[in-house]
Image: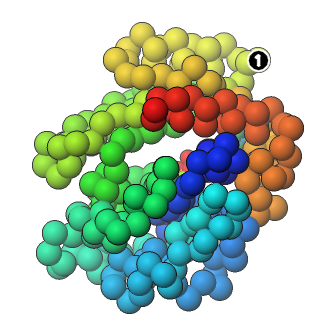
Amino acid sequence: MSACLAEAGQSVLAIDFDPQGNATSGLGMEKTELDNTVYELLIGECDMEDCLVRQLQPNLDLLPSNVNLSGAEIELLDIERKEYILKNCLEKYRDNYDFVIIDCPPSLSLLTLNAMTAADTVLVPIQCEYYALEGLSQVLKTVNLVKRKLNPALEMEGVVFTMYDARTNLSLQVVENVKSNLNQNIYKTIIPRNVRLAEAPSHGMPITVYDSRSTGAESYRLLAAEVISRGE
Ligand SMILES: Nc1ncnc2c1ncn2[C@@H]1O[C@H](COP(=O)(O)OP(=O)(O)OP(=O)(O)O)[C@@H](O)[C@H]1O
Ligand SMILES: [Mg+2]
């Protein structure tokens, strides 16, 4: 989605905030060879200028991550206001961008709290699978907790369905079930299960570059357009 927003002319900062570093390698960076990542930024070992990768694609900057970030959880424990570290790091930079997209790790952790404290809104991708609603209600609880305790301005951006398989009833049921149980913005764009989307990261390219005309790329373009129009 970051690549699609950038392609649409928005200036974008993508922050890989997951120690798995999939957003980093998926955008073509060799994650094991980085001296400075978002981890070094968080613990104060480098400045933004040292770790920010500028114009990885036109309009798209990246704060990369790698497995080092998994240590942050413990190392930041004793720091004062430890939930606000990312927010503080971004303070001077966020106004340079139309969108700052923070890709969170899958579990609730100090990293996720830092992301939600720095963010204005939370966009939740939901896989069209049986446990979708359960996972979602957990995320919504967390968002409300963060809103009460750490970031009163935090809002839900919305939920987006992904891995939709038109051949199965399950996908359709999950979408219907979430729609009828959820009082949230649900994006009209649904991202289908698409082989090209699965292949793109292994080539170190966003889908817009790997296969610009694929269903996956076109779907993310539609999603980006929706996100932009809501932002306006
Ligand atoms: N719509 C799709 N169609 C097919 N494959 C997809 C689709 N979306 C993602 N994938 C593939 O599924 C895998 C997991 O996707 P991704 O890394 O985006 O999930 P994630 O929710 O961020 O995972 P994690 O929770 O571990 O961070 C990747 O290999 C990705 O290429
Ligand atoms: Mg992920």
Residue 166 showing in the rendered view? yes
Q: Please, what is the three-letter code of the amino acid marked with disc 1?
A: Arg
Q: Residue at x 34, y 51 (%)?
A: 119
Q: Taking 223 as reference, is 96 left or right?
A: left
Q: Residue at x 66, y 13 (%)?
A: 169
Secondary structure category for the residue under label 1: loop
How many residues crowd around disc 1 within 10 Å: few (fewer than 14), some, or many (20 or more)? few
| Residue receiving disc 1 | 167
The residue lying toward the viewer, choosing from 17 and 174, is: 17
Q: Quadrant of the N terminus?
A: top right
Residue 103 showing in the rendered view? no
The residue lying toward the viewer, choosing from 1 and 104, is: 1
- Up the image or down, 10 lies above or below 173; here it is below
The percent position of residue 123, horizontal first and vertical second, equals 44, 39
The percent position of residue 162, horizontal first and vertical second, equals 61, 32
Q: Residue at x 67, y 43 (%)?
A: 8
- Up the image or down, 174 lies above or below 62; here it is above
Beta carbon at label 1 within 8 Å of ligand 1: no
- Up the image or down, 57 lies above or below 49; here it is above
Q: Quadrant of residue 121?
A: top left
